[in-house]
Amino acid sequence: MKNLTVFWEPGDLVEHPQHPDWGIGQVQSVIDAKVTVNFREVGKLVIDVTLIELVAAIQNEQR
C-alpha cells in the first residue's frame, strides 16, 4: 500500500486516468482512501486512491 495523503475534497472535479470516456467526475465524499465520485457518463463510483490515482480535471469553457 502506498503512503498516501488524500487531498481530494467534496466538490473537486477529477478524471479517471484509465477511463477518460467516463467524463469529468465530482468528488462527493472522502473516507480514508475511498473517494466517492459522481462521473458524468457512468454515475457514482467509489475509487480506492491507493490503487487508482485520480487526476484534477481542467475545464476550458468558452462562452
Image (cartoon, rainbow, N blue to C red):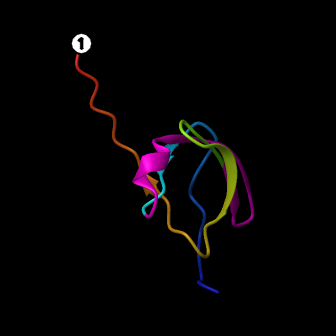
Is 38 drawn above or below residue 5 in the view shown?
above
The vertical placement of 39 against 16, above or below, is above
Residue named by callout 1:
63
* Magenta residues (range): 18-36
Q: Position of residue 41 (x, y in %)?
A: 54, 39
Residue at 40% across / 45% down in the picture? Answer: 57
Q: State which quadrant residue 42 falls in.
A: top right
Q: Residue at x 55, y 69 (%)?
A: 52
Sort mark 1 into few (<14), some (14-19) or many (20+) by Cα contacts within 10 Å. Answer: few
Residue extending furthest toward the right: 31
Judging depth in this view, the residue of 23 and 12 nearest the camera is 23
Q: Position of residue 3 (x, y in %)?
A: 60, 82
* Residue 7 image-quadrant placement: bottom right
Tell which residue pokes out farthest to the bottom in this image: 1
Q: Is residue 59 left or right of residue 53?
A: left
Which corner quadrant holds the N terminus?
A: bottom right
How far across and how far down the image is residue 51, in percent?
59, 75
Mark 1 is on which residue type? Arg
Q: Secondary structure at mark 1?
A: loop
Name the residue rendered at 42%, 61% in the picture: 17
Q: Is residue 38 left or right of residue 18?
A: right
**Viewer-proximal residue, 16 or 28?**
16
Residue located farthest toward the left when viewing the structure as drawn? 62
Query: Which residue is depicted at the point 48% across and 57% down?
Result: 16
In the displayed structure, does residue 6 sit left or right of residue 22? right
Give coordinates of residue 63: x percent, y percent.
24, 12
Does the stretch in magenta take in 55? no
